[in-house]
Amino acid sequence: MILTEKLNRVVMRHEELARSMAGEGPVDPDSFARASKEYSDLTPVVESIRQLLRAEQEAKDLSSLIADAGTDAEMKGLAEEELRGLKGRLPDLERQVKVLLLPKDETDERNAILEVRAGTGGDEAALFAAELFRMYLRYAELRGWKVEVLGISETGLGGYKEASAAISGRGVFARLKFESGVHRVQRVPATEGSGRIHTSAATVAVLPEAEDVDIHIEEKDLRIDVFRASGPGGQSVNTTDSAVRVTHLPSGIVVQQQDEKSQHKNKAKALKILRARLYDAERARRDAERAATRKGQVGSGDRSEKVRTYNFPQNRVTDHRINLTLHKIDRVMAGELDEIIEALIADDQATRLAELE
């Protein structure tokens, strides 16, 4: 039996919470809410533990039946066949329990801020950045998530210098966090007359959305500049000074917003992005201090790391961290990312499980 003591503690805690919530007398609403959430989080873990324990007990009973000299040959044969099936299932049940017991990333259930920026490659990189941004919006739509576009800086040729969006829904950050990094595209640009394949890149950053309680920003630490919004090529798109540039003086982080006609709305969007960037920086600092940060294949979140290549002539998408190649680039660009994301999550779980053993 794996992790016997820990499994027993989890089951006992689940039962303790059930008794606590069923108790009589006045209940503090905050305490009840915390207990209810913990109970809800532990329920699937306890169900898996009980399923594993039942299977292990069945295996013991079958072994005893087979070893019993009084068991007739036909019954013994049936028991041996059933035991073989159980032994085949036990490793999967054990792994399922171990995965459920892995420490949870506190940010996994948060909403996320998605930022996509054109990298090396000029106009082609900007066009690719726009396609990546739309790919993620389609993925969000397929998952039933809500998207609020925070800002888009266009190049005038249909490309994006940068684009950002707030994505909200169940488990958004857990599924998108491995997308951070450099995404590379290989194809013949529409403007290329010789048919030569070019390589361009875009950078993706996925930040957990921060609440006011996570990051407190002092007004004295901000410099707010307002100016007239401009479109591609520098032409004015607004006749009032509604665009906002927020500079966080202690960190030097600068966020600019101009999509809204209201200066107030642009400032609110800029602060939302600033808060997410500060929270992400604080998480990275804490991880580095622990010195136990895992710089593994998947989860480093390094913005400079080349994570994926999209090769259009070969209809190929390759994730370099897990050596996964899919030959269906059209479907991936249409937002069908689950196969890649599930593989990344599975690899992350396998690596963390290996570290526990």
Image: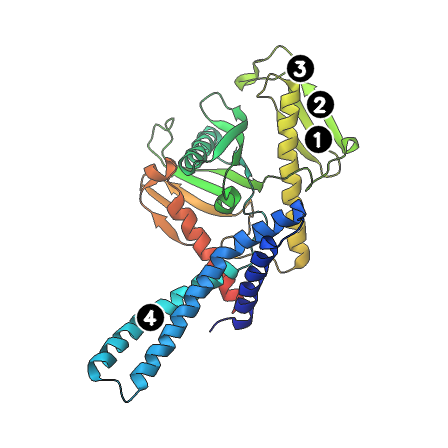
Q: Could you tell me how far apart the alpha carbons at marks 2 and 3 are, in whole angstroms?
A: 10 Å
Specify the farthest residue to the top.
239
Q: Residue at x 52, y 28 (%)?
A: 149
Helix, strand or loop at disc 2? Answer: strand
Q: Residues within 10 Å of mark 2 (few under 14, many from 20)?
A: some
Which comes sooner in the sequence, label 4 or label 2?
4
Which residue type does callout 1 highlight?
Thr
Q: Could you tell me how far apart the alpha carbons at marks 1 and 3 are, in whole angstroms?
A: 17 Å
**Position of 77 relative to 264 (above/below):** below
Q: Position of residue 301 (x, y in %)?
A: 55, 48
Which residue type does callout 4 highlight?
Leu
Q: Position of residue 352 (x, y in %)?
A: 51, 61
Tell me whether the residue at label 2 lies in contact with that at label 1, contact meaning CB atoms closer than 8 angstroms: yes
Can residue 101 be seen here? yes
Q: Which residue is mark 3?
A: 241
Q: Could you tell me how far apart the alpha carbons at marks 3 and 4 are, in whole angstroms?
A: 70 Å
Q: Which residue is mark 2?
A: 225
Tell me whether the residue at label 4 lies in contact with that at label 2, contact meaning CB atoms closer than 8 angstroms: no
Q: Residue at x 63, y 17 (%)?
A: 262
Q: Residues within 10 Å of mark 3 (few under 14, many from 20)?
A: some
Q: Which residue is mark 4?
A: 86
Q: Residue at x 37, y 47 (%)?
A: 339
Q: Which residue is mark 1?
A: 247
Q: Could you tell me how far apart the alpha carbons at marks 4 and 1 are, in whole angstroms?
A: 61 Å
- Residue 140, quarter of picture: top left
Which residue type does callout 3 highlight?
Asp
Helix, strand or loop at disc 1? Answer: strand
